[in-house]
Every structure is written in structure tokens, then in C-alpha cells.
Image (cartoon, helix red, strand yellow):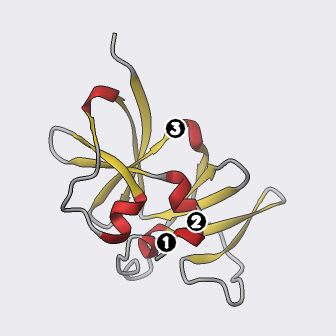
Amino acid sequence: MSKTQQFCTVQLADLYIGIEVERIQEVIRYQDMTRVPLAPPEIRGLINLRGQLVTAIDLRHRFALPKLEGDRLPMNVVVRGDDAIVSFLVDEIGEVLELQEEDFEPPPETCLGITKDLIRGVYKLKDRLCLILNTDRAMNVKTIG
């Protein structure tokens, strides 16, 4: 019997990205943020999540994508790491997919730069690719090139 893994999918511009379900604490609407002086530009600010301060990381900036247009507000995907909790700002929340581990492929050679650093690999779906986020690298602002 083949192993499966579950991913919560998010949309980021035209990228379809999967985040491991077991790493996600919660998904919430846009929250007001407090800017952090002198913080790197990918850190949009801090949100207050029931009394806990959580760093909001703009995944569009991490993937070198343009800012959201107009007055659209991002959604928050709150993710647990080994020693921190962060919120990834994404355009939209998708569905939960259960994918077969044997269908997983490493990042393609044509994938360059920060994108290659931020994804672990891909799954070929019927109508598109699902890029699997390297959650630890995306959480770690020190990995920004």
C-alpha cells in the first residue's frame, strides 16, 4: 500500500502551492498588523493571535512576485515550526489534497533562484502542478538571498 500525504493548497499569483497539513495550526482571514521597524521587506509585520505575537511573512515577496493588486487583502496560514509560529500571507486558500508519495518529484532543473530554494518538489496533477513549499526555509528569513 502506497503512502499518502495531505497538503493544504494555497494560491500565490499563478502558483499553486501545497503546505503539509500537519504543519498548519490554522487558517484565518487578514489580520491587522503592526509594522516592525527595520525588518526585512518580506516581514510584513506582527499579528496578535489570541495574545500571541506571530510574525507575518509575505510569501509573494519571498517568491519575488509583485504585490497584490488593488484593495485585495491576503489570507493568513499560521504554520508551526520547530521553535516558532509564523503566518504566511497568501492570496487564497484552496483545498486539502491527499497525494501519493510515489508521485512526488524533485524541483525541475529549470526552476532557478529563490523558487528552487523555497520548494521541496512538485506533484503533477491532472490540470496543473502543485509546488510543495519547503516550510522551514520559507519560515527562516535568514535564507533570503
Q: Nearer the viewer, mark 3 or mark 1?
A: 3
Image location (x, y in percent) of residue 72: 44, 74
Image location (x, y in percent) of residue 61: 45, 76
Q: CA distance from mark 2 to mark 1?
A: 6 Å
Mark closer to the chain start, 3 or 1 = 3
Q: Residue at x 46, y 77 (%)?
A: 145
Q: Residue at x 19, y 48 (%)?
A: 128
In the rendered structure, which amino acid carries the disc numbered 3? Val
Mark closer to the chain start, 3 or 2 = 3
Q: Are marks 3 and 1 in contact (CB under 8 Å)?
A: no
**Mark 2: secondary structure:** loop
Q: Image quarter for residue 140?
A: bottom right
Left or right of 36: which side holds 90?
Answer: left
Q: Is residue 12 visible?
A: no
Numbered circles on residues, count: 3
- Mark 3 is surrounded, within 10 Å at the Cα level, by few (under 14), some (14 to 19) or many (20 or more) other residues, namely some
Which residue is tagged 3?
21
Which residue is tagged 2?
30
Mark closer to the chain start, 2 or 1 = 2
Q: CA distance from mark 3 to mark 2?
A: 20 Å
In the rendered structure, which amino acid carries the disc numbered 2? Tyr
Q: Image quarter for residue 100?
A: top left
Q: Nearer the viewer, mark 3 or mark 2?
A: 3
Residue 73 numbered tag: 1
Q: Residue at x 80, y 56 (%)?
A: 50
